[in-house]
Amino acid sequence: MKALITDLTRMYDYHACAAGIDMDTGKRVRPVQLGRLSSRLLASRGGPLDIGNVVDFGRCRPCGKPPEVEDVRFDQRGVRLLKSMAPSDFMAMVSRAAADSLEVIGPTLLRHGSALTTESGKGSCSLVILRAPEPPTITITNGRLRFRWLDGVWLSVTDVRLYQHDLATPDEAKLASLKRALASAGDVYLAFGLGRAWQQPGDDRERHYLQLNNIHVPQWPDWRLSPER
C-alpha cells in the first residue's frame, strides 16, 4: 500500500500515530501494528513518516472495526519513503479527500461535557478532513494544546509538529509560527480523528474522543518535520 501521510499525531511514551490517503483508492487509511507505532519512524528521527510524504507500507491487510474502520496492519520492516509532495500537490490531495462535515462519523458522535465522543464500537469512520470555516483558535491551557470548535467544544490538539522532542511538551515557538501563518492563509484544512477508546474515571463506558490531529497550512514554515528536500 502506498499512502500520502496527512496525519501525524503524538502519543505518550515516545510513540506516534500516522494516517493518510491510499494513493490507489483515495480512501483514508491508518497503518497500525500489534504494538504502538514507534516515534523512530518520524522523519525528525530519521524515519520515513512526514506530512506530505508518500510512503510504501508494503502488503497491508484491513484490521479495523467501528469506528476505526481505516486501520490496516503493516510490517514496519518493509516501510520505505517514495517521495515528498510539493505543498500545492499535497493541498490538492487533501482538498479532494475533504468531507462536508463531521456528520460522516455518524449520529453516534455526540457532545460529552466539553468534548465530542463516540462510544466504543460505534461510528462510521474515525478520520475526517474538513476545510476550516474560520481561522482556528488554538491555545495552551494547563500545559495542553486545545482547539476551540464552532460550538464551544474544546478538542485536544495532537499535531506532532507542535510538540517538543519528548512529544509531550507544547512547542510555544512552533505554535507562534503557526498562528502567523494562519493570519495570512487562504484555505486551511483540519484533520480530525477519534482517539483510541478509553474510560475516564467516573464514566460508565469507554469512549473515543475526537481530537484535532493536524492543521494543514503549507505557508507555515514548519509544515514538515524534516527540511525541504
Image (spheres, rainbow, N blue to C red):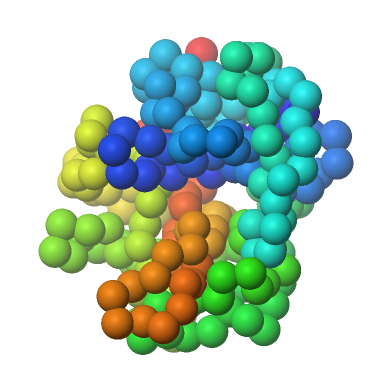
Q: Quadrant of residue 145?
A: bottom left
> Which residue reaches farthest left?
142
Question: x and y percent of residue 195 in the render?
Answer: 48, 59
Q: Which residue is drawn at 68% across and 24% down?
A: 57
Question: x and y percent of residue 71 in the render?
Answer: 67, 46
Q: Residue at x 46, y 78 (%)?
A: 205
Q: In which quarter of the image is residue 169?
A: top left
Please state if 157 lies on the left or on the right of 224 as rendered.
Answer: left
Question: x and y percent of residue 138 in the render?
Answer: 31, 62
The quadrant of the rendering that contains the N terminus is top right
Please state if 181 lies on the left or on the right of 62 as rendered.
Answer: left
Is 60 located above or below residue 193 in the figure? above
Does residue 220 appear in the picture of this structure?
Answer: no
Question: x and y percent of residue 129 in the render?
Answer: 62, 58
Q: Which residue is drawn at 54% across and 84% down?
A: 110
> Which residue reaches farthest right?
25
Name the foreground residue: 139 vs 78: 78
Q: How many labels does the image show?
A: 0
Is 136 located above or below residue 76 in the figure? below
Does residue 51 appear in the picture of this structure?
Answer: yes
Q: Residue at x 52, y 26 (%)?
A: 49
Please state if 14 lies on the left or on the right of 40 as rendered.
Answer: left
Name the foreground residue: 214 vs 34: 34
